[in-house]
Image (cartoon, rainbow, N blue to C red):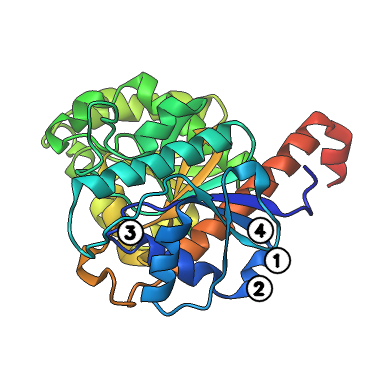
């Protein structure tokens, strides 16, 4: 694919009782959005027509029976199911979880086959998607198994990128999961992503401490001194611009994060609470480290406002733009790393 060609964006609809379909519709209501990419929504023409009517949208869907039949300049909908569905906005429903997974699995299959270039996922409910055949905590874990590479949840917005050493792990177990091998793997994934996905040649990365005040010399836990600090020193001596561990309580409030290209938090809330406080509604959840590009908005199903027309589509729109940008950056990276002379000239 040439860089200037339209990127085909596959979209999984998420929980149909949530705000996913609404933000998808709002993202593509303006026909100018089709100038950058071609959307392919994995759902049902009848279902999407219901949402169009409910939200009184002027969007036009183009129904197809498989992604190979997509048409550029149209908002394509692949019919994954044909039966009518009763939408009950704001309600958790096991059946909605089943349809969310049908959409996700069909979109992932198309992504692996190269029928779509990138995948943007609308929010799911992590509880109602669970079944005998699907027992993943969320998108990231599922895609880590379905695609190639070592996945990392990478929250991204203008001026801030946050990765995690541990993500969907109970807090009481987080420290036990943090080993030298894991630290090296996550730092390598973040560093490589910054290079190939964001065009940063010499990335500078900060790592947050496991314990309050980085353990206070063992007074509040010794994991920072026995595992994290010595591992970071080894990695830094190998020529990487990796620093820490930093005490997390003052790191963001003091704007220290602005001195780095990325921040790696030790556990989920340590990184995501400050990230969402700074950027909520405009951030993107990017699954770094895989051979395919997947992004999603930085929020959940928002049952409390589902069906009311109040959902803000900005984060979903940013997820689309970021997926396109990363896909094109990867094309450039692949091209210039194959030809060192052209890379030097660039």
- Label for residue 37? 4
Q: Nearer the viewer, residue 345 or 127?
A: 127
Q: Are marks 1 and 2 in contact (CB under 8 Å)?
A: yes
Q: Are marks 2 and 4 in contact (CB under 8 Å)?
A: no
Res 301 → quadrant: bottom left
The residues bearing labels 1 and 2 have C-alpha atoms spaced at a distance of 5 Å
| Callout in the foreground (3, 4) | 4
The residues bearing labels 1 and 4 have C-alpha atoms spaced at a distance of 6 Å
Q: Earlier in the sequence, mark 3 or mark 4?
A: 4
Left or right of 343 on screen, residue 176: left
Q: Earlier in the sequence, mark 2 or mark 4?
A: 2
Q: Are marks 1 and 4 in contact (CB under 8 Å)?
A: no
Q: How many C-alpha atoms fall within 10 Å of the one at disc 1: few (<14), some, or many (≥20)?
A: few
From the image, tell me which residue sits under label 2: 32
Name the image quarter holding the N terminus: top right
From the image, tell me which residue sits under label 3: 299
Q: How many C-alpha atoms fall within 10 Å of the one at disc 2: few (<14), some, or many (≥20)?
A: few
> In the orientation shown, which residue stands out farthest toward the top?
181
């Amino acid at each position: 694919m040439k860089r200037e060609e339209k990127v085909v964006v596959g979209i999984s609809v998420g929980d149909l009782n949530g705000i996913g379909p609404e933000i998808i519709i709002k993202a593509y209501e303006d026909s100018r959005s089709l100038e950058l990419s071609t959307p392919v929504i994995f759902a049902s023409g009848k279902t999407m027509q219901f949402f169009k009517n409910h939200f009184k949208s002027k969007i036009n869907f183009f129904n197809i029976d498989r992604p190979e039949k997509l048409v550029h300049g149209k908002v394509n909908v692949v019919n994954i199911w044909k039966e009518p569905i009763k939408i009950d906005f704001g309600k958790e429903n096991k059946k909605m979880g089943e349809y969310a997974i049908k959409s996700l699995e069909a979109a992932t299959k198309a992504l692996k086959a190269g029928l779509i270039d990138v995948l943007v996922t609308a929010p799911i409910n992590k509880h109602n998607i669970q079944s005998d055949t699907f027992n993943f905590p969320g998108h990231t874990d599922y895609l880590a198994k379905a695609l190639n590479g070592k996945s990392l949840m990478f929250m991204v917005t203008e001026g801030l990128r946050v990765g995690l050493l541990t993500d969907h792990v109970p807090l009481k177990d987080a420290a036990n999961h943090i080993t030298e091998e894991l630290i090296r793997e996550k730092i390598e994934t973040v560093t490589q992503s910054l290079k190939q996905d964001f065009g940063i040649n010499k990335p500078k990365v900060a790592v947050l401490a496991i314990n309050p005040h980085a353990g206070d010399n063992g007074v509040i836990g010794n994991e920072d001194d026995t595992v994290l600090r010595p591992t970071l020193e080894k990695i830094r001596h190998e020529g990487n611009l990796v620093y820490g561990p930093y005490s997390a309580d003052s790191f963001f409030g003091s704007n220290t994060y602005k001195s780095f290209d990325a921040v790696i938090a030790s556990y989920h809330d340590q990184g995501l609470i400050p990230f969402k406080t700074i950027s909520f509604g405009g951030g993107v959840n990017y699954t770094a480290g895989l051979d395919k590009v997947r992004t999603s908005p930085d929020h959940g199903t928002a049952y409390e406002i589902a069906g009311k027309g109040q959902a803000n589509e900005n984060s979903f729109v940013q997820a689309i733009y970021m997926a396109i940008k990363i896909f094109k950056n990867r094309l450039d990276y692949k091209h210039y790393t194959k030809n060192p002379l052209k890379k030097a000239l660039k």
